[in-house]
Image: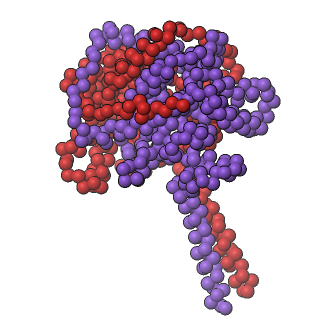
Chain colours: A red, B purple
Amino acid sequence: MALLSVLTPVLAVVLCLLIGFMLVKSREPGTTTSPSVGETKAGSKAEFRPWVDQDLQDNTEITANEKEDFIDWVESNDEDLPHVPYSPLRYPVETVLKRSQDFYTLMNQRRSVRFISPEPVPQEVIDNIIHTAGTAPSGAHTEPWTFVVVSDPEMKHRIRLIVEEEEKVNYHQRMGEKWVHDLAKLRTNWIKEYLDVAPYLVLIFKQTYGILPNGKKKTHYYNEISVSISCGILLAALQNAGLVTVTTTPLNCGPQLRLLLKRPANEKLLMLLPVGYPASDAIVPDLKRKALGDIMVHI
Amino acid sequence: MALLSVLTPVLAVVLCLLIGFMLVKSREPGTTTSPSVGETKAGSKAEFRPWVDQDLQDNTEITANEKEDFIDWVESNDEDLPHVPYSPLRYPVETVLKRSQDFYTLMNQRRSVRFISPEPVPQEVIDNIIHTAGTAPSGAHTEPWTFVVVSDPEMKHRIRLIVEEEEKVNYHQRMGEKWVHDLAKLRTNWIKEYLDVAPYLVLIFKQTYGILPNGKKKTHYYNEISVSISCGILLAALQNAGLVTVTTTPLNCGPQLRLLLKRPANEKLLMLLPVGYPASDAIVPDLKRKALGDIMVHI
């Protein structure tokens, strides 16, 4: 009995340390329930919500920071590839200057436009623009992007319903917080007419990992940065062709839209771009951009 | 005494739960030592390393996922701004098609080039290109980018020393893991001659937060995505002008380079781009890009 009363605190300590350790472990990424498990349970709306958040847990970029400190991007795959001479067109210096000025003028006319014309745009133009986006550099040349181009009216409408439902929830929550009563203003914020009207919706997915021939996952380092760079080139290509879009990141709808569009589990929605000509009565907020001196430092 | 022997296990349990709780808390982001505290201690090399990792903890994107579900990017600042008509140049459909083809052809010639010519490039060209990058869209129109353009030879060399030191460590660690003995091959990987040779080094910083007039921090949602998009437009502008670069992400050198370049604590290095004309004997790995059908799905 005396022995037991001495041992009890020791046992309690061991037990508690064990509990503490388990608590710590349970917070580590990778030990949480995987999205695919959540998906099978996603029957009712009530069960659906938590899965939405689980599926959004994407720590690929964080892992990248820890594991790969400096990446020359294509270097990993480079070593065994033959090298070829690179001698692109060389412009005279006046031409270089002129081209850099003209391209600035062109790109500076780009604006995010929510009023998109329903006029048709040839599919070949969109093909060229997506092809251009695909010329972006990517970490270890993984090219971790999928561009889903939706022109089917019914599919566009289903996307709109999903996005607006999420938007409505968001704005109501914000309204609750801010005690805003201007419903008319809020309404225009969560109604996304352009999702029906624009001839194309481009949904850009990042491939967070690939599957190796042996079935194992292969992390795509810097996949979000790579796909965002690709998106920058896509925006330049749209502007160059006289088309408009508005950059949107419907993150909470990502899992639902991924399922709707039948994309695999390694793909996460990064952006949704409605694409078309600007409507003839399009308006944009009178935003100004920072001056060059406010964004550039010369040393 | 009997009371004490009964109480001891209870006390032990309470104590251990407390320890467990503290362990859990200490793993939560936000409760770790802040980078600024670490910086003041960063005297010796030994003390410096842990701070390097602390400074890299950037969970801005994660916070964004949780707080802002769908962002129309400029919408937050839009509401109080006057709106103006937007009627850009409208091309005939044949021109749209031709322009989209030509831009693809131009961008598809872009390659990551490590062999950069020391020939001078007019500063005005670089100004135009940075100005073009600054036309990118950004979350809530925060324009969260700083482009540090380095042409001073001594500063370029100091950057090279920092980057190569980190690279050397990385490659030795990898060599240790992989039992690779081909030192010659590794050497070419960590030697970054272009950091001295290129007429310009462009270091792109993301501003992870801003400072409000009342001194409080203002989170820049989607700052990494925004700056990466801007970088995509910058790469397009370089290619358009006949200049080359190689996309590099020297993340572990970020804090040292930030201090060297005297950038404030809210800025984190995202990319380092050496910029110039390609060397006349430049070679590139014979990489292929995915076919359009492998990156695009049409619905």
Q: From what the image shows, is residue B98 above or below residue A44?
A: above
Vertical comparison of B179 with A180: above or below: above
On the image, the x and y values in percent for residue A276 come to 30, 22
Q: Residue at x 30, y 51 (%)?
A: A174
**Quadrant of the image containing the C terminus of chain B:** top left
Residue visible at 35% across and 40% down? B140
Give the left or right position of residue A85, taking residue B136 as reference: right
In percent of width and height, residue A112 lies at 32, 30
Whether residue A35 is visible to the viewer of this picture, yes or no, is no
- Residue A11 visible somewhere in the drawing: yes
Furthest residue in direction right, as rendered: B181
Q: Nearer the viewer, residue B167 or A45?
A: B167
- Eyeballing the image, is A113 above or below B207? above
Q: Residue A179 sits in which quadrant?
A: bottom left
Q: Residue at x 56, y 43 (%)?
A: A62
Instruction: State the image quarter where residue A19 is shown.
Output: bottom right
Q: Position of residue A115 (x, y in %)?
A: 25, 28
User: Taking A5 as reference, is A178 left or right?
Assistant: left
Left-right relation of B194 to A104:
right
Looking at the image, which is closer to me, A140 or A21?
A140
Looking at the rendering, in which quadrant would you find the N terminus of chain B?
bottom right
- Total marks drawn? 0
Compare residues A198 and B299 and report the one nearer the observer: A198
Q: From what the image shows, is residue A16 above or below residue A141?
A: below
Residue A104 place in picture, x, y as percent: 39, 21
**Which residue sits at x=68%, y=37%?**
B166
